[in-house]
Image (cartoon, rainbow, N blue to C red):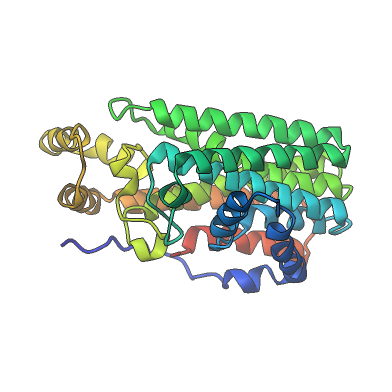
């Protein structure tokens, strides 16, 4: 069996995530304790589903960005904490729906909800979380935040549809970036901007943080797509899951572009197989190693991390700004 690709970056590893997020650690603890308790219902199936997927871990990066956005100004208040939970519920809803669309069997090293309780439970639980998130948003009585989140969820749905209809025969990088900007990065951007808005940040400052979040989210997704071709112990999902689902992410897009005629014909054969099994995944992984596809992908992620850092250079030097700088470094050098 081929060895997983190494994806070590060519720069010093940053501090661990827990250390980086120390300025909001107490708020993160409060958030963690409230996320599940606030969505308890009299429907045992829904409780089981939400406890399973939310309790399975995750970095909580998106709600944490809400907290960090607020701390750049007057700090975390009740509305900020509520918005952070809303962001996590929206994200969780998309995971529940994604796993049905993808036919996924594992997430975060656990069986998916659709695998345990069925597609119906997964879709309906996701619908409930979406609806509840927007109900909570309306209670905030902040038109700007409500408009931002409405635009963001619309973009996320667009990204999923673009990915669903993308063909390996048209695998340019620009189309890939459009997908991940809509599918992933816009929620990062909306999260940190929401925190800024609710904590009294100016329009210019909130917009700069939006740019930071967008670039950070792009970098995050690019690294995720590289990790898919490495080791399931790092991702909690089988190696080559994106390939099996015919998702043309950046590593595969670059490989399709750079492969010679012989390798391109073989890739076309693999991608048109009814089922893509481990031997075919190993072939593609070896090709990626030969053509430098993963290294190229990681270099792209670093470019967007630097873009995120540049977008907040106008903020005064502070421990919070440094936290955002370090978070960008962490995103592109993580291995899990």
Above or below, 16 against 299 in this view is below
Q: Is residue 293 left or right of residue 181?
A: left
Whether residue 27 appears in this view of the structure is yes
Counting from the top left corner in percent of width and height, residue 264 is at: 17, 35
Q: Is residue 264 left or right of residue 62?
A: left
Q: Is residue 23 left or right of residue 127?
A: right
On the rendered image, what quadrant is the N terminus found in?
Answer: bottom left
Residue at x-position 62% and y-position 54%: 47
Counting from the top left corner in percent of width and height, residue 261 is at: 13, 33
Q: Nearer the viewer, residue 224 or 35?
A: 35
Above or below, 331 against 102 in this view is below
What is the quadrant of residue 63 in the picture? Answer: bottom right
What is the quadrant of residue 227 in the picture? Answer: bottom left
Residue at x-position 22% and y-position 64%: 3
Above or below, 183 against 66 in this view is above
Q: Nearer the viewer, residue 4 or 328?
A: 4
Counting from the top left corner in percent of width and height, residue 87 is at: 68, 47
């Amino acid at each position: 069996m081929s060895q997983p690709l190494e994806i070590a970056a060519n720069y010093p590893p940053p501090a661990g995530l827990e250390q980086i997020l120390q300025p909001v650690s107490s708020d993160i603890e409060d958030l963690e304790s409230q996320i599940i308790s606030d969505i308890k219902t009299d429907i045992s199936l829904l409780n089981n589903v939400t406890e399973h997927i939310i309790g399975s871990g995750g970095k909580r990066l998106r709600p944490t960005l809400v907290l960090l956005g607020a701390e750049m100004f007057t700090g975390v208040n009740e509305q900020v904490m509520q918005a952070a939970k809303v962001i996590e519920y929206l994200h969780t809803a998309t995971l529940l729906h994604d796993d049905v669309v993808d036919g996924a069997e594992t997430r975060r090293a656990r069986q998916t909800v659709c695998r345990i309780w069925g597609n119906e439970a997964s879709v309906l639980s996701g619908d409930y979380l979406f609806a509840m998130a927007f109900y909570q948003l309306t209670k905030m009585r902040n038109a700007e935040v409500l408009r931002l989140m409405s635009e963001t969820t619309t973009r996320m749905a667009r990204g999923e549809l673009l990915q669903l209809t993308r063909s390996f025969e048209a695998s340019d990088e620009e189309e890939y970036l459009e997908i991940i900007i809509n599918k992933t990065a816009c929620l990062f951007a909306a999260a940190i901007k929401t925190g800024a808005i609710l904590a009294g940040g100016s329009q210019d400052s909130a917009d700069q943080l939006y740019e930071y979040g967008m670039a950070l989210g792009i970098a995050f997704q690019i690294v995720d797509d590289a990790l898919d071709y490495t080791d399931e112990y790092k991702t909690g999902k089988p190696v080559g899951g994106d390939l099996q689902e015919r998702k043309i992410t950046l590593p595969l897009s670059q490989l399709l572009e750079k492969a010679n005629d012989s390798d391109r014909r073989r890739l076309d054969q693999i991608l048109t197989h009814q089922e893509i099994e481990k031997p075919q995944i190993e072939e593609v992984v070896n090709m990626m190693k030969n053509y430098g596809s993963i290294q190229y992908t990681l270099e792209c992620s670093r470019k967007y991390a630097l873009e995120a850092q540049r977008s907040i250079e106008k903020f005064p030097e502070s421990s919070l700004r440094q936290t955002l700088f370090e978070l960008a470094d962490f995103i592109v050098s993580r291995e899990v």
